[in-house]
Amino acid sequence: MSSAARKIRLLMLLRRNGVNSTDVLRAMELIPREVFVPPTFHDQAYEDTALPIGHGQTISQPMVVGLMTQALQLSDRLKVLEIGTGSGYQAAVLAKIARRVYTIERHRPLLAEAEGRFQALRLHNITARHGDGMRGWPQAAPFERILVTAGGGMDPPPDLMDQLAVGGIMVIPLGADRRSLHVVRLRKTETGVEREQLWPVRFVPLLPEVPVEPGRAEPGRGQAAPGQGGMERGDMPPPALIPPDFSDVIHQRA
């Protein structure tokens, strides 16, 4: 089967399983996922599965990318902050819909690879930098939308909530531990935050600070901070998983 045929098959699968936004499906059609995975996995680029991208990280399952992008309720007028650039695939999909995308990655090698892909695909509305995603990007705030592609903790990082515009939406995996994560949509209002629990998911943990470059000491750094996803990332973190039967997906407003 050709790459184009595999992509069509994947898009049909996403539509059948709840990704019904024309903008999201079109963005995922336009972005070549094979560009964001190692050559040894090119033949699996349009399978609905997470794939390793090196540095102990994965590119998210396409179903997760589609559903989380859809949950943001994007338009071409909005400025988006993404926490966790990874391969750059999610940021590329966002950039096909939103006006401007800012993305932060804590691993320098991943960031360099992602920036090269953005340039090759002429995605000039993406700005990326190395840093601690939990601190956000205050110089570019406020953001109308924030997407966090790592999980952990019962509440979002305070700095990210501060940088979300009133009326804005944050989509983030939250839970007491990695076994109980749910994607949650937070809408910031004049008087507080509306919280909507969407579906169960598994993600690598959201970690504070940034990895130390090889050969340099990392003062005061051990495991992840309590409430931020538990253990440090391993060589092959669990992929993000969405149940195929969406009749069991939870939709409730807290």
Image: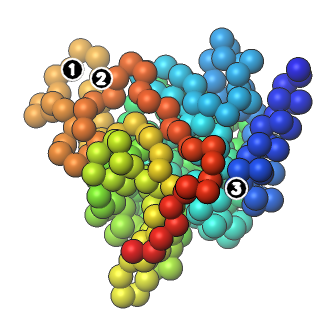
Residue at 49% x, 20% y: name it. 54
Q: Is residue 134 visible?
A: no
In which image quadrant can residue 2 be found? top right
Residue 107 versus residue 186: which sits nearer the camera? 186
Give residue 138's position: percent from left, percent from top. Answer: 37, 61
Q: CA distance from mark 1 to mark 2?
A: 6 Å
Q: Amino acid at mark 3?
A: Gly
Q: Is residue 183 above or below residue 185?
A: above
Q: Residue furthest bottom?
A: 191
Check disc 1 and report the residue beneath it.
Answer: 216
Q: CA distance from mark 1 to mark 3?
A: 46 Å
Q: Is residue 210 left or right of residue 102?
A: left
Secondary structure, mark 3, is loop
Q: Quadrant of the N terminus?
A: top right
Residue at 36% x, 48% y: name it. 180
Q: Residue furthest left?
A: 220
Check disc 2 and report the residue beneath it.
Answer: 213
Q: Amino acid at mark 2?
A: Glu
- Mark seen at residue 119: none
> First in sequence: mark 3 or mark 2?
3
Give residue 32's position: percent from left, percent from top. Answer: 76, 34
Residue at 36% x, 88% y: name it. 191
Q: Is residue 97 above or below residue 228?
A: below
Q: Amino acid at mark 1?
A: Arg
In which image quadrant can residue 7 be found? top right
- Mark seen at residue 18: 3
